[in-house]
Image (cartoon, rainbow, N blue to C red):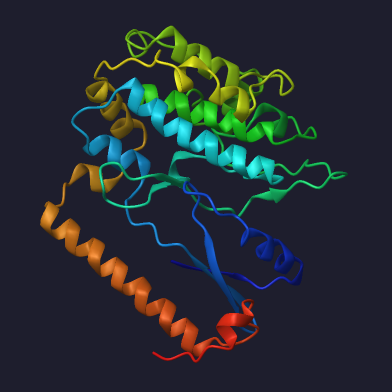
Amino acid sequence: MVSLIASLDSNHCCFLFFFRIKHENIVSLEDIFESQSHLYLVMQLVSGGELFDRIVEKGFYTERDASKLIRQILDAVKYLHDMGIVHRDLKPENLLYYSMEEDSNIMISDFGLSKIEDSGSVMSTACGTPGYVAPEVLAQKPYSKAVDCWSIGVISYILLCGYPPFYDENDTKLFEQILRAEYEFDSPYWDDISDSAKDFISHLMEKEPTLRYTCEQALQHPWISGDTALDRNIHESVSAQIKKNFAKSKWKVRIPSFFSHLAFLAQQFFFFFLEYWLLGLLRINCYKPELCLRPLTI
C-alpha cells in the first residue's frame, strides 16, 4: 500500500525511526520516496479486511475469540510503548486483518497521530477519535501512553456487545460522558458476558490514568492469560449491534464471494504495479541506500 502525505522536513527522522518497527501485529513501513512536494510511504500490504467485517461475516463468535484479538492488540501496543511510541488513535477502523485466512493476524495501522515519547517531553495535544479518546485528553491535561490503554478498553467493550460505551449525537454531551467515565454494562446485552471480561474492561477504562492498567498488566489478567473467557456463542447479538451502530452499505448488500475474491485480486495487482511505478519514477532522495544502488526496472 502507498500512502501520500505532505512533505515536512521535521518528519524525516520520525519516519526513519518507524523503519525500526517490526512486529507481527503492526503494519510496517517498507520504504519512503520523496518528490518536491510530497512524501510517499510504501506500507506493508494487508488484504484481510476490517475487524468489524470479519466479525459480522462469522457464524460463530465468542468471548474467547474477542480475548484472542485483544491479546494481539495488547502485545503490539506494549511493543510500541516499550519503544517509546504512543499511537493515540486506536480504534476498530485501524485494525485490519493481514490476510483472508481464518487464523490471520490482526494488524494495527494508521500512525498519523502517533507520537514518540521523549524523556523530557509532555504530550498535551488534543487528538484522537471521539468515542475512543481518554478523559485526560478531553480535559486538556498532560497525558501519557495510558491513553492507548483506555482506547483498548473501549475496543474490548465494543467487541463484546457491538455498540460503543459512550454515545451521543451531540459531541459536547458525548465528551461529558467520557470525562465522567460514565458507562454501563447494559442488560440484556451484557447478561451472558463473564464478570472477568467486565473486570478487565473496568481496569482499562479507569478514569484515573495512574490507576489504569498498563498493557503489561492487562496481558496478565485472567481474561487474557487464563481461561475465564467464555465459549458461549454471542455472534447474533454482537453482529446485530455492529450493523446497527457501525452501519456500512456493504453490510446491507452482500456481494457474492466470487466477486469479492476478484476485487481482492484486483486490489493486490493495483498496489503491486503502483509500487513499481513509484520505484521507477520517484528515484529522488531514496532513504534506503541499498535500493538506490540497485538497478530499478519496470
Q: Residue furthest right?
A: 120
Regarding residue 183, the answer to whether it shows in the image is: no
Position of residue 125 relative to residue 200, above or below, is: below
Q: Quadrant of the N terminus?
A: bottom left
Q: Please tell me in which quadrant of the rendered image residue 273 appears.
A: bottom left
Instruction: Residue at 29% x, 34% y: name it.
Output: 243
Q: Residue 216: image x %, image y %?
A: 61, 28
Position of residue 200 relative to residue 171, above or below, is above
Which corner quadrant holds the C terminus? bottom left
Can residue 114 be seen by looking at this rendering?
Answer: yes
Residue drawn 51% across and 28% down?
154
In-image side of 159 versus 243 (left or right) = right
In the rendered view, does 102 fall on the left or right side of 140? left
Residue 99 spot, x, y in % from top left = 32, 52
x 81%, y 47%: residue: 118
Q: Which of 236 and 279 is in front in this view?
A: 279
Residue 177: quadrant of the picture: top right
Q: Is residue 186 above or below residue 65?
A: above
